[in-house]
Image (spheres, helix red, strand yellow):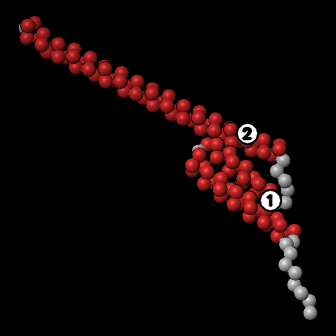
Amino acid sequence: MRQRVNTIGSKGRHLGAAAAAAAEAATAAAAIIAAGTTATAAAATAATRTTAALHHRPITQQHHRKQQQHYQQQQQQQQQQQQQQQQKQRKQQQQHQQQHQQQQQQQQQQLLLQMAAPTIQ
């Protein structure tokens, strides 16, 4: 009678590595909520590890560097968009204030003309 031996084959090891990396990604995702921006980079790294484990290849420093550059570019784009929005809002507020001041000046001039009108007649 042949005995069945419980061994983990190479696919099993890779799946185990993928599962561990996925667990790490889940942990990193929870950290994102708690820690914010810094955790986002960790999640990106964990996601890369998951992909690498599934594709049976190690993460190269070059790939990691590219990923960090991409993340930094996204952050810069978001900051630029926020700054542009803030500038737009400031400009709108200034225009609104100018319009309001012009209206007040016109009302004051009309009031002065109305007050002066009886004396002119």
Which residue carries the number 2 mark?
69
Give residue 53's mark: 1
Residue 42 on image: x %, y %? 69, 48
Q: Is residue 4 above or below residue 28?
A: below
Residue placed most toward the observer, 118 or 58 = 58
Residue 87 on image: x %, y %? 50, 28
Label 1 sits on a secondary structure element that is helix
Q: Is residue 96 above or below residue 5?
A: above
**In screen coordinates, is 63 left or right of 82?**
right
Residue placed most toward the observer, 80 or 2 = 2
Residue type highlighted by circle 2: Gln
Residue 120 on image: x %, y %? 10, 6
Residue at screen point 59% across, 35% down: 79
Label 2 sits on a secondary structure element that is helix
Residue at screen point 78% across, 45% down: 64
CA neighbours of label 2 inside 10 A, class few (<14), some (14 to 19), many (20+): few
Residue at screen point 78% across, 66% down: 16
Q: Which residue in the rendered view is the most extreme toward the right?
A: 1
**In screen coordinates, is 116 left or right of 2?**
left
Whole-number angstrom distance, CA of label 1 to CA of label 2: 22 Å
Residue type highlighted by circle 1: Ala
Quarter of the figure with residue 9: bottom right
| Total residue callouts | 2
**In screen coordinates, is 91 left or right of 66?**
left
Residue at screen point 68% across, 38% down: 72
